[in-house]
């Protein structure tokens, strides 16, 4: 598959949150006892989650924030039916009615930990929010904001069509990362108005992009993904773009209740839905 060039010349991206379901997706070869469990008490009911050991930086950061009571009193500040419910903005603790939320968090981000296709965006997946690709080509996660997937069910033919779109998205992401790695060279060529040099470098990076993509084996949904997305649903277009680091084990009916809340123009629930406390389950 050949990359579709989105820009005619290389544009350097800047690195700066756009950001019951008993689910079958589990940490392979691990028992539940080996996984960190967290109880999320909300004003709508309790949600139990587990954190994956294969995403240690996200797991350890989440544990740290739970132990620090960082999430206590925060809101589910962004809720979209048949998509996801998002929380973790510390600014939401004291937010007034109608205040716009979604940019708060600690003064750090977390490197992406894509364990794909083992973990994907099926219904009940716990994932990290992040800033958009334009300012965050490395797809680093927010230091605190997370979302729980609700999503919808798909037909197999819809997933087949989506494969092609996601393949192009993956190609563009690889290309953007290569541009970042070569940003000093790109800047020099731009400053000297060396269009021929820019074009030559662009062709080189496109060739490298295609080689990396081919080495990965392209993009295809696995049998497990197809089964999940056609039976319980999810958000497959987010796969390999946002870090999935856990999942809901109990209380998906509470998540369903939250996703049906009436919201304002910024997707914030009209009536505050709050995380009362989070605690580790021993």
Image: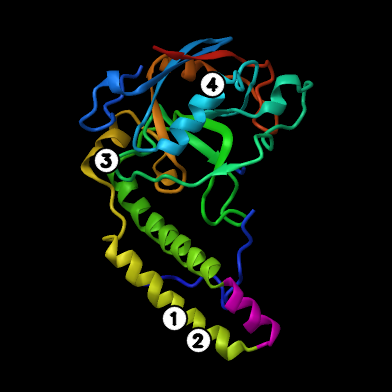
At a point 34% along the width and 53% down the height, the residue shown is 163
The mark that comes first in sequence, 1 or 3, is 1
Residue 97 occupies which quadrant of the picture? top right
Q: Badge 3 is on which residue?
A: 226
Q: Badge 4 is on which residue?
A: 66
The mark that comes first in sequence, 4 or 1, is 4
Which residues are the magenta region? 183-193
For the residues marked 3 and 4, what is the alpha-carbon distance in whole angstroms? Answer: 33 Å
> Which structural element holds mark 2?
helix
Is residue 68 found left or right of 191 in the rendered image?
left
Mark 3 touches mark 2? (CB < 8 Å):
no
For the residues marked 2 and 4, what is the alpha-carbon distance in whole angstroms? Answer: 50 Å
Mark in front: 2 vs 4: 4
Q: Nearer the viewer, residue 57 or 140?
A: 57
The mark that comes first in sequence, 3 or 4, is 4
Mark in front: 1 vs 3: 1
Mark 1 touches mark 3? (CB < 8 Å):
no
């Amino acid at each position: 598959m050949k990359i579709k060039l989105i820009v005619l010349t290389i544009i350097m991206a800047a690195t700066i949150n756009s950001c019951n379901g008993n689910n079958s997706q589990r940490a392979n070869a691990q028992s539940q006892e080996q996984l960190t469990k967290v109880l999320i008490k909300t004003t709508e009911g309790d949600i139990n989650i587990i954190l994956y050991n294969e995403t240690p930086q996200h797991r350890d950061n989440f544990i740290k924030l739970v132990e620090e009571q960082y999430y206590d009193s925060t809101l589910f500040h962004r809720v979209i039916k048949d998509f996801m419910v998002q929380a973790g903005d510390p600014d939401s603790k004291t937010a007034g009615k109608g205040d716009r939320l979604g940019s708060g968090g600690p003064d750090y981000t977390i490197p992406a930990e894509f364990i794909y296709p083992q973990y994907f965006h099926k219904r009940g997946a716990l994932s990290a929010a992040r800033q958009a690709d334009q300012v965050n080509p490395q797809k680093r996660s927010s230091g605190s904001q997370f979302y729980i997937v609700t999503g919808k069910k798909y037909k197999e033919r819809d997933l087949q069509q989506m494969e092609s779109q996601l393949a192009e998205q993956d190609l563009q992401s690889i290309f953007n990362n290569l541009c970042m790695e070569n940003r000093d060279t790109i800047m020099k060529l731009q400053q000297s108005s060396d269009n021929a040099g820019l074009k030559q470098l662009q062709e080189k990076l496109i060739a490298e992009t295609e080689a990396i993509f081919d080495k990965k084996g392209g993009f295809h949904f696995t049998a497990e993904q197809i089964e999940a997305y056609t039976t319980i649903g999810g958000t497959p277009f987010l796969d390999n773009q946002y870090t999935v680091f856990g999942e809901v084990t109990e209380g998906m009916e509470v998540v369903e209740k939250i996703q049906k809340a009436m919201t304002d123009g910024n997707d914030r629930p009209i009536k505050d839905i709050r995380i009362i406390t989070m605690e580790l389950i021993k």
